[in-house]
């Protein structure tokens, strides 16, 4: 008799196949199809007979409502609350991902402890560590007296049963890949288990009004492990980033239904855990009094916060036939564009030279306003002329060589003045700040002339 009760799910992309094959036809990965039962329900908990018997319709409502917005839960970790949009919303589901060892558990333990000290009822459920390990970390962080409810569990049925009996304000699950449901035969961490367990946890958050924070593993490519549907289910997807060798950690929101998606939180990892950084500009800038050739300070905007960071460039004669292009903290495509504009519009030739560009401090910059700072650093390195110590640079570069204006110029100027900078090299600005001299440029050739002749 033919077996029609089995299906095969790709553990890489989640595509369902009717029969086994060596390669997934959707993502092209080999040996990723895993057999799972077709008779299991799509969820993780079998529905009761009473629930199955009820077949009522839905009721529509209008957009007008007098119901006030629910108050946010302030955890006490200001940088975490900033990225969430001002605090954690009750009934929301948050997915936090990051590389192994970056500090996800440390961050969430601090969030749980400080929120509990502020009066919230918090549950911290770990499937990767024992309770004693969590206690030891809390003692090292100085948070051992916080009234956090700890548990080490992985069985989803037991976790849901406990959370439905007891009322919590915040529930942290570390991690979603360790949970397993007895409805499905696949092991913990599989596509089916992650999808089903995440769906049940989100359903719990919406029905009970509890804020659920799920920790997610990442693949070697930096993507959240498991099916992409989990990112669609939750209300916010946050990424905890950090370069090895740097103590700084950046919390970013890639998706947020209750706040901005371009906000960042900055932390510094130390022996006693994470420390919030209220003024990241002072950390990302170099401490030297004299600026070396190839360095330019960029006045950027990360979310609602202006940040000053040093961009470093090095141009040297290539020793091989193919010159190198190495970038850390910026987009490789934008560097190629800036190099092409410098060569086509300004006469700089980089065809036989290696080019290295680095954003100091481990920060990653995504906004186009960094074009002018990168070009200034490249020109400074190529000519051997240093930019003034008190000068910041920002502006977008077009393919024709024009320097285009950017937004939030007044906030950038205020941040530069606060840190002692008194000169700005930028496109024409309407905003002015007392004590800051603005040198306006309209073409990239003007920038080359001013840097090479040291005229600001």
Image (spheres, grey):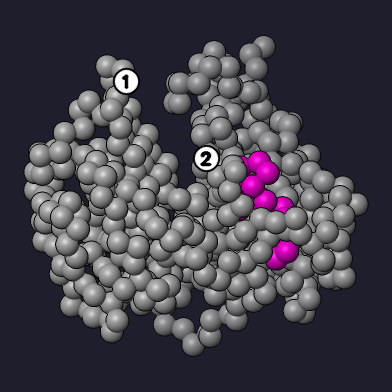
As displayed, is residue 39 above or below residue 84? above
- Do the numbered discs 2 and 1 sit on residues whose CB atoms are within 8 Å? no
Around disc 1, counting alpha carbons within 10 Å, would you say few (fewer than 14), some (14 to 19), or many (20 or more)?
few
| Numbered circle sitting on residue 205 | none
* Cα–Cα span, label 2 and label 1: 36 Å
Residue 137's place in the image compared with 65, above or below, is above
Residue at image point 22% right, 44% down: 383
Q: Quadrant of the N terminus?
A: top right
Give the residue furthest to the bottom.
66
Judging from the image, what secondary structure is the residue with disc 1 in? loop
Query: Mark 2: which secondary structure?
Result: loop
- Count of numbered badges drawn on the protein: 2
Discs 2/1, front: 1
User: Mark 1 or mark 2, which is nearer the start of the sequence?
Assistant: 2
- The quadrant of the image that shows the C terminus is bottom left
Q: Judge whether residue 443 is colored magenta.
A: no
Residue 228 percent across, percent down from the top left: 51, 42
Residue located 72% across and 53% down the image: 105
Please indicate, yes or no, whether residue 148 appears anywhere in the rendered image: no
* Residue 157 horizontal side relative to residue 219, left or right: right
Residue 223: image tag: 2
Q: Residue at x 21, y 39 (%)?
A: 339
Location of residue 345 in the rendering, given as x and y in whole percent from the top left corner: 9, 43
Residue 391 visible from this viewpoint: yes
Query: Which residue is the site of mark 1?
Result: 319
Specify start and end residues of the magenta stretch as a single range.
Answer: 96-111
């Amino acid at each position: 008799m033919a077996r029609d009760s089995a299906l095969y799910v790709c553990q890489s992309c989640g595509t369902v196949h009717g029969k086994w094959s060596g390669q997934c036809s959707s993502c092209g990965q080999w040996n990723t199809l895993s057999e799972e039962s077709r008779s299991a329900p799509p969820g993780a908990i079998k529905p009761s007979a009473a629930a199955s018997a009820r077949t009522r319709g839905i009721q529509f409502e209008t957009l007008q409502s007098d119901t006030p917005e629910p108050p946010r839960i302030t955890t006490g970790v200001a940088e975490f609350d900033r990225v969430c949009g001002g605090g954690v919303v009750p009934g929301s589901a948050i997915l936090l991902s990051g590389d192994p060892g970056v500090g996800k558990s440390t961050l969430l333990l601090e969030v749980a402890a400080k929120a509990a000290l502020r009066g919230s009822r918090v549950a911290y459920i770990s499937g990767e560590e024992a309770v004693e390990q969590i206690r030891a970390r809390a003692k090292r962080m100085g948070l051992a007296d916080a009234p956090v409810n700890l548990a080490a569990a992985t069985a989803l049925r037991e976790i849901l049963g406990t959370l439905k009996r007891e009322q919590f304000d915040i529930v942290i699950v570390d991690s979603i890949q360790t949970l397993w449901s007895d409805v499905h035969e696949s092991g913990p961490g599989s596509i089916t288990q992650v999808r089903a367990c995440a769906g049940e946890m989100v359903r719990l958050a919406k029905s009970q009004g509890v804020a659920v924070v799920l920790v997610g593993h990442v693949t070697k490519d930096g993507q959240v492990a498991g099916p992409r549907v989990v990112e669609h289910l939750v209300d916010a997807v946050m990424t905890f980033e950090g370069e090895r060798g740097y103590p700084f950690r950046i919390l970013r929101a890639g998706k947020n239904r209750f706040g901005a998606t371009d906000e960042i939180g900055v932390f510094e990892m130390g022996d006693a855990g994470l420390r919030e950084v209220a003024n990241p500009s002072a950390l990302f800038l170099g401490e030297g009094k004299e600026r070396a050739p190839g360095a330019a300070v960029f006045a950027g905007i990360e979310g609602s916060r202006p940040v000053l960071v040093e961009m470093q460039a090095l141009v040297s004669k290539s020793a091989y036939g193919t010159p190198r292009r190495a970038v850390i903290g910026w987009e490789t495509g934008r560097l190629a564009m800036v190099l092409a504009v410098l060569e086509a519009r300004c006469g700089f030739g980089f065809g036989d030279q290696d080019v290295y560009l680095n954003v100091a401090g481990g920060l990653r910059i995504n906004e186009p306003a960094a074009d002018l700072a990168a070009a200034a650093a490249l020109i400074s390195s190529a000519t051997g002329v240093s930019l003034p110590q008190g000068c910041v640079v920002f502006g977008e570069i077009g393919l024709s060589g024009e320097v285009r204006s950017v937004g939030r110029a007044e906030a950038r100027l205020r941040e530069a003045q606060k840190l002692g900078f008194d000169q700005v090299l930028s496109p024409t600005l309407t905003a002015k700040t007392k004590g800051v001299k603005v040198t306006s440029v309209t073409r990239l050739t003007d920038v080359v002339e001013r840097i090479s002749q040291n005229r600001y």
